[in-house]
Amino acid sequence: MKKINLRELYPDVYTTDFFVDVTEEVMETIRAAERAETAYERKMYRYKAQYSLNCENGIENAVLLKPPEKQAKRIYAR
């Protein structure tokens, strides 16, 4: 059994230290979730993603096909 501090996992809920004994399975699940979240954040900053990486496929192509506003005004003015 491992002892974890719930204040570290939920700082907005637990303002004081609250220790709980958990099994190895639960501890490994918590660690896996933390690793996945860290990897997601690293991937988002590495590729300078300003949008959610869980969006549909092709979102980056939709942005590329739309001309900038200034250019669009020039095209439609003629």
Image (spheres, rainbow, N blue to C red):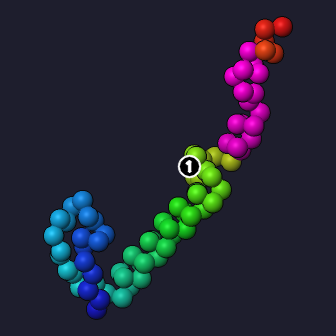
The single residue placed furthest to the right in the displayed view is 78
Tell me which amino acid carries mark 1.
Answer: Ser
Q: Tell me what residue is drawn at x 71 percent, y 36 percent.
A: 62
Above or below 69: residue 8: below
Residue 51 on image: x %, y %: 57, 46
The percent coordinates of residue 46 (x first, y second) are: 63, 60
Tell me the residue at 29%/89% (across/down): 2
Where does label 1 land, which residue?
Answer: 52
Q: Residues within 10 Å of mark 1 (few under 14, many from 20)?
A: few
Q: Which residues are magenta?
A: 58-73
Name, please, the residue furthest toward the top.
78
Please state if 77 lies on the left or on the right of 40 as rendered.
Answer: right
Q: Quadrant of the N terminus?
A: bottom left
| Residue 36 vertical position relative to residue 71 in the rendered view, above or below | below
Left or right? Give the position of 75 relative to 31: right
Query: Considering the numbered disc 1 on the image, is that residue within a helix, a strand or a loop?
Result: loop
